[in-house]
Amino acid sequence: MKKIISILAIIVVVCLVLAGLGRVALKKIKNPGDKEVLVRLENPEEGVLVEFVTAPGYLAPKEKVDLSARIAARITELPYEEGERVTKGDPNAKPPVPASVLVRLDAQDLEAMLRSAEARYSAQEAQIEVQKAQIAVSQANLEQIAVSLEQTTKDLKRQKELFESRDVSESSVDQLQSQLDQLKAQYAASMHSLESSKLNQKVGQFNLEAADAEIFRARDALSYTVITSPIDGIVTRINAEVGELVMTGTMNNPGTVIMQVADLSQMLIIAQVDESNIGSVKVGQQVEAKIQAYPDEIFYGTVDDIALTSSTGPNGKYYETEILLDTAGKQVYSGLTADVDIHTFKHEGVLRVPSQAIMSRPVDELPFSIRDENPNIDKDKTDAAVVYCFRDNKAIVTPVKLGPSDATHTVITAGLTVEDRVIVGPYKVLEKLAHDQEVKDERLAEKEKKEKEKEKEKEKEKEK
């Protein structure tokens, strides 16, 4: 019996020891060591928040021209090199400034065509003069026949009167009648001949106009052998060499692009704005741009034009948006890659906090005293947006209502004031942070650490 009692006593002691160890272990789990939870604090600040749309893009001149030939011919001269400045000229200047000649083409065949057209024109002019002379002759003959016809008609009348009085024979009357009929036939033939000559003169005039049109066309084609600059700018690309045959464009062939001239004083960023964001983009909005070739600089611009139809890329549909760039006098190159932030909406006098401070927590896990009748919690949603405020060295979960945001901050429309101190990091701490958990301001902890180090240094100096 005594043995049983001893065994029971030993069991009770062991259980008490294990229970004590369990409490110690549990305490260590809840508060692992003496390590403090350090947090970074900030006050919500009143200020300005700008919403923006981000899009990729590339640089291009606002004004550029691809020069192609309008005739098929060989290049005989390319006076300018890439990078040289050219001008469209100014006829009103004193003295007048001629346009820069960029390309000269072989003009021999076209000059021959022009001389041939001019010769045909001169020949046609001479033919018209011949026709005029023929008309004059026909008119003179017609007048002569008319005079003869009138005289013969009078003679015939007198002969008939004499025939009635039996003073002349019937054969005399018949002879004059025959002569009169012949004159009438000659008159009709001369009249038709005159009309034919006049019609030939009209045909000749039309042929003269056609010959004049051929001269105009030949001169126009000849003018295409000299290509001048249509704008003031810089030769940015030359695709051909002297001696090459350039071709004109057709429906399936765009033709030979000889060179490109661009005005690099005004540059655009052609941004590809996703279709989901294009609704908030408007002409005139301010833009910040980062060009990969200049990583340490920020460029500014304004939205100049928005495409009315979409294009399709590897990431879906987008709308090309032209942004007029302020280069601040810096030489930037066409084709450079850029990323733009288009400022779509500006909110002034708003309360904002770093976006990292905003967490999502299930509504059912929030303390009852906080979620009960809280106007900042949407009861129709399972999760609530919260921040952790720093009060009495503890993290207090605080539901908030959110407004718009930018890349770093979010507007708080309800739930906070400028006097609140909000825990904004580190993010790893925020992820695991619980309501009413003890925390410490990292700035204060750093200050205390430095003070302890100074005290230790003083003690070491005293010991010496």
Image (tube, grey):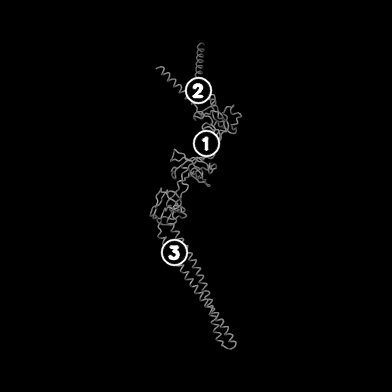
The answer to whether one can see residue 317 in this image is no
For mark 3, what is the residue?
118
Whole-percent x and y of residue 370? 58, 28
Name the amino acid, label 3: Glu
The numbered mark, 1 or 3, whose residue comes first in the sequence reads: 3
| Tag nearer the camera, 1 or 3 | 3
Residues packed near mark 2 inside 10 Å, few (<14), some (14 to 19) or many (20 plus): few
Which structural element holds mark 1? loop
Q: Name the foreground residue: 317 vs 173.
A: 173
The numbered mark, 2 or 3, whose residue comes first in the sequence reads: 2
The residue lying at 52 percent from left, 36 percent from top is 406
Q: How many numbered badges does the structure rendering display? A: 3
Residue 31's tag is 2
| Tag nearer the camera, 1 or 2 | 1
Residue 406's tag is 1
Which structural element holds mark 2? loop
